[in-house]
Amino acid sequence: MTPPEVSAGEAVLAAAPARALRTVRRRGADAAFTLALRLASLFVLAAVVLLIIETLQGARPALHAYGFAFLGGTQWDPVAEKFGALPYIVGTLVTSAIALLLAVPFGVGAAVFLAEISPPGPAAVVSFLIELLASIPSIVFGLWGVFVLAPVLRTSVEPWLIHHLGFLPLFSGFPFGLGVLPAGLVLAVMVVPTVTSVSREILRALPDSLRGAALALGATRAEAIGVTLDAARPGILGAVILALGRALGETMAVTMVIGNSNRLTWSLLAPGATMASVIANEFTEAVAQMHLAALFEVALVLFGVTLVVNAIARLIVMAATGGRRDVAGAA
């Protein structure tokens, strides 16, 4: 009879090829997965590069004709072929700033309440409604702005602002109901769900031991919430960046309520326009080559502004967090 030691050794030798085959297959699967991820990343990069190339080709006539003067020009006359994007750049930045100034406090406050204070049942219902609000098409927000928000602003809010703060350039003019301020308010309503949903998930992802440690050291409930907010700061700032990206590129809702004027004004009550709204309004009607090229250049400027603003926001995140990414809320 074969000794047990010999039988065990033969079994090990017999199993060695199978183990080697599994190792080869595992390494092959890992290599294929890594290759797929790299191809996906390259596809995204290629899409961005192609987008830039196509936009540059479309904007080439305007780039040669106006150069950098296009960024500081205030005229927009398709008949005379005089184009300047400054009113649209200012309108885009101002409406986005209004949206963030209003949306961030409300959004973060709602996220803190849902994640830290509210009972689980009501929090789940409210969270579902907030996510449902985020899925509403932008044209519905535009209709709400035209038929609900604009009349209220025209008859109540804007006359009060003109009467009490009309000495300031920001609140001078007439109560049109449609203008930069209504566009900023509509954008604020649209981006609040983004800030709230992302911030809530960030806060819920933090370990309970963080809150427990703060309470064990004698912190009050408010102080413990402050500790969690500090830990979640990178993620909350990331939520703000996402909201900013949507505010900068929003088209239909802004087009319906901003008034669509190509004049540069510093009054929030006056009609204005954004880069996205002027493209939506005029692209289908642009028949002259220079007019079409100017719209392509506006799109290129919008891409550049979005890139610069998001880069600045990233730098702010890094400065505010010391570059740390080791918490659950890291951006």
Image (tube, rainbow, N blue to C red):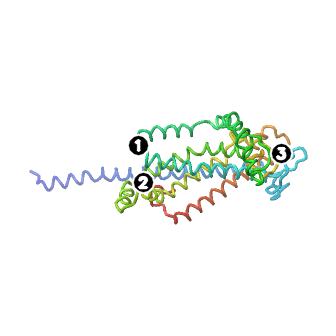
User: Residue 274, percent across and down?
Assistant: 74, 47
Q: In which quarter of the image is residue 71?
A: bottom right
- Which residue has dot 2 on it? 206
- Mark earlier in primary sequence (1, 2): 1
Question: In what element is the residue under mark 2?
Answer: loop
Name the disc covering residue 29, or none: none
x 62%, y 52%: residue:
101
Instruction: Using the numbered discs, state the Cα–Cα distance from disc 1 to disc 3 in whole angstroms.
Output: 56 Å
Instruction: Name the residue at 43% across, 44% down.
Output: 118
Vertical comparison of 123 with 29: above or below: above
Q: Which amino acid, by three-letter code, is at mark 2?
A: Leu
Circles 1, 2 touching at the beta carbon (< 8 Å): no
Residue 49, percent from left and from top: 66, 52
Q: Name the residue under label 1.
A: 119
Q: Residue 290's x, y, as percent? A: 84, 47
Q: Is mark 1 on a helix, strand or loop?
A: loop
Q: Which of marks 3 and 2 is in front?
A: 2
- The answer to whether residue 316 is left or right of residue 278 is left
Residues at marks 1 and 3 touching, judged by CB atoms closer than 8 Å: no
Q: Along the line of sight, which residue is nearer the eye, 37 or 59?
A: 59
Whether residue 176 sits left or right of residue 31 in the image: it is: right
Per the rendering, the mark at residue 291 is 3
